[in-house]
Amino acid sequence: MDRLADIWFGLPAGVQDVATTVLLLLPALATGAIVLRGYAPGRLVRAMLRRFSTANMVFVALIAISVAIGVGLTAQERGLRQGSARAAGAFDLIIAAPGSEITMMLAAVYLQPSDVPLLTGAQYVEVASDPDVALAAPIAFGDSYQGAPVIGTTAEFVTHLAGDVVEGRMFATSAEAVAGAFAPVATGVSFTPAHGHGPAAEADAHAGSVYTVTGRMAPTGSPWDRAILVPIEGVWEVHGLANGHALDEGDRIGAPFDAAYFPGTPAILVRADALWGNYALQSRYSRPDMMAFFPGAVLAQLHGLMRDVREAMSMLAVVTQVLVTVSILAGLMILTRIFARGLALLRAIGATRRFIFAVVWSYSASLISGGALIGLMLGWLFAFGFSRIVTARTDVFVTASVTWTEVHLVAGFFSLTLLLALIPAWAATRRPLLTDLRN
């Protein structure tokens, strides 16, 4: 047994998926081979499908919708998890004032408006001057423009997040900005930010303060695609604060910052040159006056908390499949009554019970096969469409695609229903011949 397990786990993932699909389909294939051995009821089955096409299409639609719900739910849930994880991929380590890691992650990574405490200039300089720190980018939020968040940071952060700008150039003064890939501003446009977000935003709070967009970032698949990034000095100046540098330094932007002129920042994105360095920094700066956390780890905890929701969705899909399977069984029993007189005539002219069994089972298999295949395609369409809606609402790029998981789900459903189709096929052979002929 251990030897077989070792062989199985030693196979490539693609081979395992194909093998699993074949194993799930094997009961249906074996049943078909046994039932149809020596018979070819294809022409008669096609005639039955044409004769009652409307009823058959309704039956196929019922199966297809059931399969599509199961496929769509599982594909969408996986796509949402992958999209949220991808959006957090560029955020190695976040350092912030003590508080809720989840709140800070939602604010710093997913740009959800939050009221959080600030780190001081001394704390920032301590982190930025750490020899293990390769990047320490302050992140300041609170303003917006036409619903898009205006985020203060550094040019190094922009490059870390999205690489080189794909249009125009990087900001060079505190009055310039770089737009996210889908931000509602064009290169060369000037705008005045509003204080706050949403309906409560104060449009005139920063009257007289203007940013000019000098470039546009590449898409990141995250809420940052709709953000407008400005030098953090600009955010401080707009709010009437010092800009992080001594007065004799003029309009210089970027690190290093002077702790005495550093008004504070809600969060610092930190990255070390090596993976072990990030863990060392996380341990070093997890202390009473600061918290350091990995957004990916917090997101994993959230996914863990959502496991009950995921299991509920999976259970809903299973319950749906069970209910529809029972409905299919009842429906097939009803459909066989429609063909009862025709089947009785076949028996009267010499057809064996086993041939009738093969005809009814093949007819059922045709409906189930068509419904399962259409349902698989519909499930992909449902998941694709819902992903577009989720992406538009959250700005997290979600792609839900049909994978081997959904194929396995459909294959298992297909085999189970074909096995259950043996019941109405058997029932059709046990009906009283004379009664059906009279009816």
Image: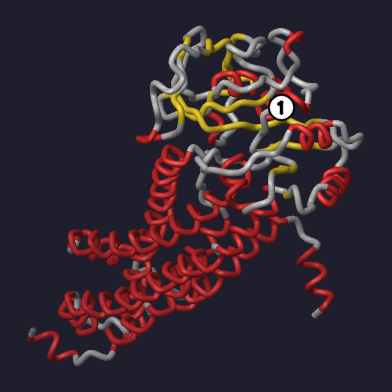
**Looking at the image, residue 101 lies above or below residue 189:** below
| Category of crowding for the residue at label 1, using alpha-carbon neighbours closer than 10 angstroms: few (below 14), some (14–19), many (at least 20) | many
Please name whichever residue, 200 or 432, is drawn nearer the observer in this view of the structure. Answer: 200
Q: Residue at 35% across / 84% down in the picture?
A: 423
* Residue 287 in the figure: left or right of residue 57: right
In x, y percent, where is residue 95? 73, 43
Report whether residue 47 is seen: no
* Residue 190 in the figure: left or right of residue 251: left
Q: Quadrant of residue 172?
A: top right
Q: Residue at 88% across / 35% down in the picture?
A: 130
Q: Residue furthest left?
A: 438
**Looking at the image, residue 420 lies above or below residue 55:** below
In x, y percent, where is residue 106? 57, 46
Helix, strand or loop for disc 1: loop
Report whether residue 298 is seen: yes
Check the picture and name the quadrant holding the C terminus.
bottom left
Please name whichever residue, 275 or 113, is drawn nearer the observer in this view of the structure. Answer: 113
Please name whichever residue, 14 or 100, is drawn nearer the observer in this view of the structure. Answer: 100
Q: Quadrant of residue 24?
A: bottom right
Q: Which residue is mark 1?
A: 262
**Looking at the image, residue 232 lies above or below residue 405:** above
Q: Residue at 61% across / 26% down in the picture?
A: 152
Q: Which amino acid type corresponds to the residue marked 1 in the rendered image?
A: Phe
In x, y percent, where is residue 258? 78, 23
Q: Residue at 61% across / 46% down in the picture?
A: 104
Check the picture and name the quadrant holding the N terminus.
bottom right
